Amino acid sequence: MNLDATDKRILRAVQSRCTLSAEELSELCGVSPSTALRRLKRLRDGRVIVSEVAVVDPKKVGRPLAMIVGVRLNRDDTKVADAFIRRMREHRAVTQCYFVTGAADYIIHVSTTHMDEFDEFVRRELICDPHVEMTATNVVIKPIKVGLEVPIGD
């Protein structure tokens, strides 16, 4: 899909606040409300916009601990990898999971209520898996920048 300047203005606007009214969006993007909504629908239908979410403060919902975990599997086997990926997608404490290059195969962001919950995650999802060769955990002391906004050029 080719994106013009109006599409890019719309994307920048809705990335930071997806609840904008048609009027607000049209003012920010310099188009009529009907044009803004038509373009927004096209961006959604074309899967340029894949999801619209509310960002929740984990501390305010009782999940103050965040861990970043690197995991390396000991086999290059698609069935093993697929099973691991499925478990990460399904686990409620896993908020993000990435297949990466480097020392780890996967980087996982885990949101927990307390260290005991994280310990349970490690025991059930990582230690019990005979294909997990290595884990390295970093405890998030203080988030500096959190978001999923993609920089969109002019």
Image: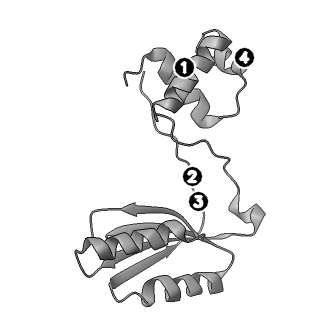
Disc 1: which residue = 39
Residue 104 can be seen in this image: no
SS class of the residue under badge 3? loop
Marks 1/2 in contact by CB < 8 Å: the verdict is no
Residue 105 percent coordinates (x, y) = 31, 69
Crowding around mark 3 (Cα neighbors within 10 Å: few <14, some 14 to 19, many 20+) is few
- As helix, strand or loop, the secondary structure at mark 1 comes to helix
Q: Which of marks 1 and 4 is nearer the N terminus?
A: 4
* Of the two numbered discs 3 and 1 in the rendering, the one whose residue sits closer to the viewer: 1
Disc on the earlier residue, 4 or 2 = 4
Task: Confirm or deny contact between disc 3 and disc 2 (CB under 8 A).
Answer: yes
Gap in Å between the C-alphas at discs 4 and 3?
34 Å
Indicate which disc, 3 or 1, sits on the residue closer to the N terminus.
1
**99 left or right, relative to 125:** left
Q: Residue at x 46, y 77 (%)?
A: 137
Hey, which residue is sitting farthest left in the picture?
Answer: 76
Rendered residue at 57%/52% (across/down): 146
Residue 143 badge: 3
Q: In this view, does 10 lie to the left or right of 84?
A: right
Residue 15, numbered label: none
Q: Distance between the residues labelled 1 and 4?
A: 14 Å
Q: Is mark 2 on a helix, strand or loop?
A: loop
Name the front one of labels 1 and 4.
1
Disc on the earlier residue, 1 or 2? 1
Which residue position is annotated with label 4? 23
Q: Nearer the viewer, mark 1 or mark 2?
A: 1
**Amino acid type, residue under disc 3 in the picture:** Pro
Disc 4 residue type (three-letter): Glu
